[in-house]
Image (cartoon, helix red, strand yellow):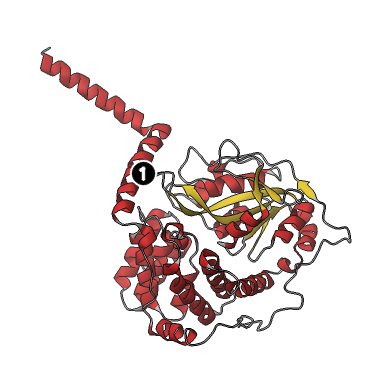
């Protein structure tokens, strides 16, 4: 055999072995993470997402902004909602424990088996839900959850409602998902034996680029310590100290505010009566949203910077849930108006990856071009377009202005990045098109 033939044979064998090795999940993941990281770093260097500002184009938005800027802000009235126009009595304070016994000074619930999110792409949500479920004896894995809630492995985000849906459809446990929580309510739940999954905004190094920036993050709260003013959390990201990771009360309050103080509690059926008593006013979902809306309204003129931005956003998000789309659109306009004044490297530029309320508000107010512009900006300035909700809403807005082909294309993109994504499948069915 000639030297050239030997070289070719060796090259072909090495290429084959390299292909086999690349197909192995651990190697494939590491290589793809490096490739994705390099691509993201180049894109973010050329087009810094922190600099991108959404400006609502609707004439309604412009008129609202001009009106609001013409007078000194005063405290907002109670949210106007379709089915309950006023707040219920004692809405400011969750119902205390069902007994007269004061809350203990500290609680540290045991029984959560720690699960980290590493070794798989963006596995924060599956890891944290696995921890909350295994507290009640669930024997599945984070991968069991991931296969359902993020069937496309590189999906950027799993929404809280998707985690709640998993509990309902895939386990024998029950679940409560509420907004507007307080630090006291977390303590009440812990004192009654319930661990609490929350979502907050944190500043972490990006997995692919190493840049420190704002992102959403889940954590499971398992205890508190009044003497040290700290919550005890199980943090899937922080290694090796994520087990019993302590967070100051003030820090958790700030991080939690970014997601409207949302919390998720799983429980077995036999614990339902005890949980409802511990939830107090939060037992009713609509009441919880009114609590959240009022809390945000009160905070708007007390806070500044990012916290004020989140307060406007939170008010709007709760009004969406209460079907007050006009009030929600106005509040979102104010949030986006404030955004350019935020410190650039601290801006929560991933906000629309995690919260889709503006799409609801603008769509149901007939502001279709604002939906299209916001969704397009969100998709275009992500390193990769793995944002099924943005494609879904952009498609619906396109159809509303007569671009049915654009709707079909966007719904198919949504299904590509989230196989089986029910809203997009239903939209295609409505259009008489197969996915």
In the rendered view, would you say 189 is above or below 56?
A: above
Is residue 431 visible in this depiction of the protein? no
Residue 406, image quadrant: bottom left
Q: Which residue is mark 1?
A: 37
Q: Is residue 26 above or below residue 304?
A: above
| Residue 199 drawn at (x, y percent) | 58, 56
Classed neighbour count for the residue bearing mark 1: other residues with Cα under 10 Å, few (<14), some (14–19), many (≥20): some
Residue 283 in view, yes or no = yes
Eyeballing the image, is 82 above or below 55? below
Q: Quadrant of residue 378?
A: bottom left
Q: Is residue 214 above or below residue 285?
A: above
- Please report the residue visible at 57 percent of the width from the left and 56 percent of the height from the top: 200
In this picture, residue 21 sits left or right of residue 243: left
Point 38% across, 75% down: residue: 370
Q: Residue furthest top?
A: 1
Quadrant of the drawing holding the N terminus: top left
């Amino acid at each position: 055999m000639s030297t050239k033939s030997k070289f070719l044979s060796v090259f072909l064998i090495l290429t084959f072995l390299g292909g086999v090795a690349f197909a192995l999940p651990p190697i494939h993941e590491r290589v793809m993470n490096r490739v994705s990281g390099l691509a993201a770093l180049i894109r973010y260097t050329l087009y810094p997402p922190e600099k991108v500002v959404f400006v609502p184009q609707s004439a309604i938005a412009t008129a609202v902004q001009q009106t609001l800027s013409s007078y000194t802000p005063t405290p907002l009235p109670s949210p106007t909602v379709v089915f309950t126009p006023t707040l219920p009595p004692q809405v400011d304070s969750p119902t205390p424990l069902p007994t007269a016994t004061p809350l203990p000074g500290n609680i540290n619930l045991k029984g959560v088996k720690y699960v980290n999110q590493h070794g798989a792409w963006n596995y924060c949500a599956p890891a944290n839900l696995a921890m909350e479920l295994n507290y009640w004896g669930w024997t599945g894995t984070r991968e069991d959850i991931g296969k359902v809630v993020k069937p496309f492995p590189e999906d950027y985000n799993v929404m809280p409602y998707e985690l709640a849906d998993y509990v309902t459809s895939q386990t024998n446990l029950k679940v409560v998902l509420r907004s507007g929580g307080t630090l006291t309510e977390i303590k009440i739940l812990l004192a009654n034996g319930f661990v609490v999954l929350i979502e907050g905004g944190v500043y972490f190094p990006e997995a692919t680029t190493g840049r420190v920036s704002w992102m959403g993050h889940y954590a499971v709260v398992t205890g508190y310590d009044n003497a040290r003013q700290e919550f005890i959390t199980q943090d899937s990201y922080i290694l090796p100290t994520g087990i019993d990771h302590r967070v100051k009360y003030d820090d958790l309050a700030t991080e939690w505010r970014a997601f409207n103080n949302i919390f998720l509690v799983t429980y077995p059926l036999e614990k339902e009566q005890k949980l409802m008593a511990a939830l107090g006013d939060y037992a009713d979902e609509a009441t919880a949203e009114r609590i959240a809306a009022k809390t945000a309204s009160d905070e708007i003129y007390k806070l500044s910077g990012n916290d004020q931005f989140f307060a406007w956003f939170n008010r709007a998000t709760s009004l969406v849930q209460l079907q007050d789309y006009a009030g929600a659109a106005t509040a979102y306009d104010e949030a986006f108006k404030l955004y350019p004044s935020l410190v650039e490297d601290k801006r929560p530029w991933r906000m629309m990856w995690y919260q889709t309320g503006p799409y609801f508000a603008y769509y149901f107010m007939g502001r279709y071009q604002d939906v299209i512009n916001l969704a397009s900006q969100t998709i275009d300035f992500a390193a990769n377009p793995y944002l099924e909700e943005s494609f879904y809403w952009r498609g619906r807005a396109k159809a509303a202005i007569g671009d049915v082909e654009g709707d079909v294309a966007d719904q198919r993109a949504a299904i590509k990045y989230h196989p089986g994504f029910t809203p997009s499948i239903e939209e295609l069915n409505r259009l008489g098109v197969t996915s």
